[in-house]
Image (tube, rainbow, N blue to C red):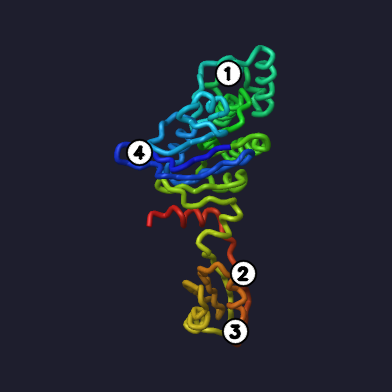
Amino acid sequence: MIHIENLTKYYGDLCAVDQINFDIHKGEILGLLGPNGAGKTTTLRMLTGFLQPTSGTIRVKDLNIDEHLLEIKKTLGYLPESAPLYHDMLAYDYLDFVANIRGLDNKQKKNRIKYMADLCGLNKVMHKPIGELSKGFKQRVGLAHALMDDPEILIFDEPTSGLDPNQIVEIREIIKRIGKEKTIILSTHILSEAEATCDRIIIINQGNIVADASPENLKQSVSGKYNINISIRNVETEIVKKVLGSIEGIENIETSADDNILQAKLTCRSSADLRGDIYQKIKQTDWILLEFHQETQTLENIFQELTKED
């Protein structure tokens, strides 16, 4: 559906996007994650034709964006972080205006506006000025705008930015609903939103792609680093570090003691599951094992590890 090859963007001497490569498949919901200034918005603006790349290739449905920009734009719906709305217009009049620009005839326009009002939950505000609407309803109007001519591809830049938790859930559910029929690319700072909504996540940092996988595969594969926590009785800290620290793949051991119970966090860096090795070592001692579990790797942990400045 979309092919990105060696995409690069410079602002003067600053490289905002540095030769990134990825494909987006039909029907996929792709999340683009990264810290502020990572290059997310610049990438989306190049995908929509709003910005000219310094170098690289963008192809949409086998059309090169340099040669077929207008045809490509007809397949796209775009919602920037701040929806560009006319605040003096009624919501209905604004959507009618958008439908006219998109070339819908009167019958198509009427049906489409009604469908958008139902889908985006706008029925009770259709005859209110946009300037009087809450941020959540303004985002819904912007979403209806992006969807008006039923585009195949939707690009959302921080679609839930500035919304309260209830509004975030509502916009997320709308995106998941339309994602059953569309190809969607969205950037977000909210990791739980990406995990709940996206089929695949790309993490970008300092203009480079540092991870590309499904949320589950991302949690399992990144760096092979994970933690195992144990609680044991009848043992000294130094002995635990000596015995368990001898296992290949255990990178660090942090301990704390309370009422003769030692809590130990074992940081493991290995593609293998070290729980069996750890248990066998403990089994050979007279330690009393009270607790043994592996921490679940979270998207937040992975994001922090991949985007830290060092």
Question: Closer to the camera: disc 4 or disc 3?
Answer: 4
Q: Which of 183 and 307 is in front in this view?
A: 183
- N-terminal-most mark, 3 or 2: 3
Q: Is residue 128 visible?
A: no
- Which of the two labelled residues, at mark 4 and mark 1, occupies the earlier sequence position? 4
Q: How many angstroms separate mark 4 from mark 3 (CA)?
A: 60 Å
What kind of residue is marked 2?
His
Q: Distance between the residues labelled 4 and 1?
A: 33 Å
Q: Which amino acid does label 1 sit on?
A: Arg
Q: Which amino acid does label 4 sit on?
A: Tyr
Secondary element type, mark 2 = strand
Task: Say how many tags the image has.
Answer: 4
Residue pictured at 59% horizontal, 15% vertical: 103
3D distance between C-alphas at marks 2 and 4 = 47 Å
**Residue 117 sits above or below residue 215 on the image:** above
Query: Residue 217: which quarter of the image?
Result: bottom right
Q: Of marks 2 and 4, which one's residue comes earlier in the chain?
A: 4
Report helix, strand or loop for mark 4.
strand
Image quarter (top left, top right, bottom left or bottom right) of the C terminus: bottom left
Q: What residue is shown with label 4?
A: 10
Residue wearing tag 2: 293
Instruction: State how far apart marks 3 and 2 are (Cα).
Output: 17 Å
- Work out whether residue 207 or residue 61 is closer to the camera in this orientation and state it: 61
Give the crowd class for mark 2: few <14, some 14-19, many >=20 residues within 10 Å: few
